[in-house]
Image (cartoon, grey):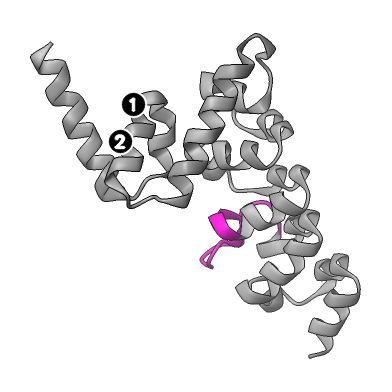
Amino acid sequence: EVVLRAVESDPAALRWAAEEWRRERSLVLRVVERFGLALEFVDGGGGGGSGTPKLCSDRDVVLSAVASDWAALRYAAPELRSAKDFVLACVLLDGRCRSLAFEDVANEREVMLLAGDMPECREEAKALRLTIERVRRHPASRDVVLRAARQHPASLLFAAPELRAAFATQAGAATVRA
């Protein structure tokens, strides 16, 4: 309870908490929602301690931190900073996240569009943002997902897994027929 009160009054106090508290998911979520940069002190910082759950690899924890402060992405595990779907979700929150993603993902057209780094394509960026938001609201709706994916295949990254597979099968069949 002392730790909880300390980090609630000053989220940066997480750095001095015992390691077991820095691995407590519910506590960490509460802290990073208010002070995203506290992600630096989670799991020993920047990807976790050995043999333990790594909260810096937990998509929900890191997204909460990024929603609070975009720069918290620098403390995310490398596998998240190199995952296109995750980087797209972060860039939707704040375009500056692109600068902290791994270079190959940061240079993907969809990531650049959402980050606003292609001003000549504003209308396309707006359409991509809308299709992704539509899929995020209805990830299990076959019609919504397939329509959105036809407009912008990147929106498929936010669909339910079974629909991703169905679309991939459909796209493959269309290629064979062409």
Task: Residue 141: say if magenta.
Answer: no
| Kind of residue at disc 2 | Leu
Identify the residue position indicated by label 2 in the image.
Answer: 146
In screen coordinates, is 2 left or right of 42?
Answer: right
- Image point (65%, 8%), residue name: 120
Image mark for residue 56: none
Left or right: 141 in relation to 106: left
Q: Pick the residue in front: 84 or 52.
A: 84
Image quadrant holding the N terminus, namely bottom right
Residue 95: image x %, image y %?
A: 70, 32
- Whether residue 153 can be seen here: yes
Between 76 and 34, the one lying in front of the other is 34
At 55% across and 18% down in the image, what residue appears?
A: 124
The image shows residue 49, relative to residue 76, as above or below, that is: below
Q: Return the residue nearer the eye: 11 or 154.
A: 154
Q: Is residue 48 magenta?
A: yes
Badge 2 density bin: few <14, some 14–19, many ≥20, Cα 10 Å: many
Residue type, mark 1 in image: Arg
Q: How many marks?
A: 2
Q: Residue furthest left?
A: 177
Q: Is residue 106 visible from the viewing direction of this image?
A: no
Q: Position of residue 79 (x, y in %)?
A: 51, 43
Q: How far across and how far down the image is residue 29, in percent? A: 67, 68
Q: Which residue reaches farthest right?
A: 9
Q: Position of residue 115 (x, y in %)?
A: 66, 27
Residue range of the region highlighted in magenta in the rendering: 45-60
Q: Which mark is residue 150?
A: 1
**Which residue is pictured at 74% across the width and 48% down the height?**
72
